[in-house]
Image (tube, helix red, strand yellow):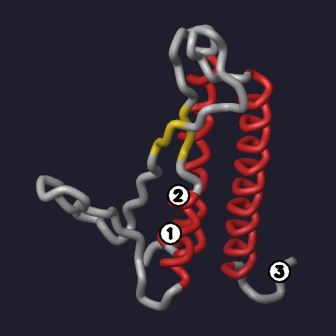
Amino acid sequence: MALLDSPYFSLLQERLGHLAQRQRLIAENIANAATPGFTPRDIDGRALSRAADQRAAPGAGVALALTHPGHVAPANANRALTARVIESPDTETTIDGNSVVLEDQMVRAAETRMAFESGLALYQKGLQLMRMAARPPGRG
């Protein structure tokens, strides 16, 4: 097993990918703040927590839910995690039907950035620990 394929690093990689996808959606929401009838979208936050719960179970992996007979299971179904995009209207809707509130989107963007930075710090710390463990004894 490759070092970066360990459960620690693979879950962090999935988390960072999830947060990057969420940041893209928030940017799209902000860009469409003046689009009539636009409803903001977000990532279903429960997907990653379910994945983490499944990973915690011995021998369990993350698999896509095949909800339609035409769906084909991916070759790496045990590692696949796809975040589900959901409509997430903000606190108010304008007369033209747009429900993007810039303040709410900015709060989501800041939360996502902080979570990404935390995940990145954990990833870097894990790499530091692996480097330290791989050093020969007696070297500082």
Task: Name the one closer to the observer, 98 or 68.
Answer: 98
The residue that disc 3 covers is: 139
User: What amino acid is labelled 2 in the image?
Assistant: Glu
The residue that disc 1 covers is: 51
- Do residues under tags 2 and 1 come within 8 Å of each other at their CB atoms? yes
Q: Secondary structure at mark 3?
A: loop
Of the residues under marks 2 and 1, which one precedes in the sequence?
Answer: 2
Mark 1 crowdedness (10 Å alpha carbons): few <14, some 14-19, many ≥20: many
Q: Is residue 55 above or below residue 36?
A: below
Q: Secondary structure at mark 2?
A: helix
Q: Nearer the viewer, mark 3 or mark 1?
A: 1
User: What amino acid is labelled 3 in the image?
Assistant: Arg
Pick out the residue farthest to the left. 70
Report the Cα–Cα distance between label 2 and label 3: 34 Å
Q: Residue at x 87, y 77 (%)?
A: 140
> Residue 43: percent from the left, percent from the top?
54, 45
Task: Name the one closer to the observer, 126 or 16.
Answer: 16
The residue that disc 2 covers is: 14
Screen quadrant of the N terminus:
bottom left
> Residue 105: percent from the left, percent from the top?
72, 30
